[in-house]
Image (spheres, rainbow, N blue to C red):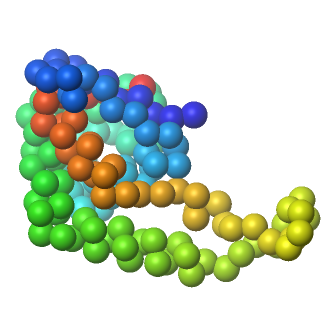
Amino acid sequence: MGMDVYGRKPTAPEGEYFRRNIWGWHPLAEFCLNFAPEESRPCKDWHTNDGYGLNAKQALRLAQRLDEFIRDGSAAQYIARRDAELAALPENTCSRCQGTGKARPVMAYYRLDLDDVTEFAAFLKTCGGFRIR
């Protein structure tokens, strides 16, 4: 399962469609909500595919904020800190796992890369608003 994000009135190919599987979408949505809460707030729910989204003006404002965080290095710092926290999570006991009987916690599978933020910012700049489906 994934989240398909469709541009409402795209002005360039990169604004037509953006997709991430659930393991990548939820951390990206959380990044937007935490780093740009004012710009993200108009979208009623980032974690469902019920058609919520932002209009063109709101999407552009969010893109500008994401670009700021990419440029000043705070996005990369956040991702590095998040990766370290996930790596430090203890393994869970798992009766179904072969060998060690241990498994990584589910949270460790939710990944965020700087490319995700960069690609989403590029989408937002030319999407003309979007809906999450």
Query: Where residue 13 appears, x then y in whole percent?
Result: 20, 23
Q: Which residue is at 16% across, 18% downward?
A: 9
Q: Residue furthest top?
A: 9
Give the number of marks: 0
Front in this rendered view, residue 82 or 40: 82
Q: Examine the rendered structure and indicate whether residue 128 appears above or below residue 102.
A: above
Q: Examine the rendered structure and indicate whether residue 105 appears above or below residue 130.
A: below
Front in this rendered view, residue 67 or 53: 67
Q: Is residue 33 visible?
A: no
Query: Where residue 110 appears, x then y in whole percent?
Result: 52, 56
**In which quarter of the view is residue 128 placed?**
top left
Q: Is residue 43 left or right of residue 121?
A: right
**In which quarter of the view is residue 127 placed?**
top left
Quarter of the image with the N terminus in it: top right
Q: Which residue is at 33% across, 32% downward?
A: 18
Q: Is residue 34 visible?
A: yes
Query: Where residue 47 appears, x then y in whole percent?
Result: 45, 43
Q: Is residue 79 left or right of residue 128?
A: right
Front in this rendered view, residue 128 or 43: 128
Q: Which residue is at 16% across, 47% downward?
A: 62
Quarter of the image with the C terminus in it: top left
Q: Which residue is at 37% across, 57% downward?
A: 113
Query: Where residue 57 appears, x then y in whole percent?
Result: 8, 34
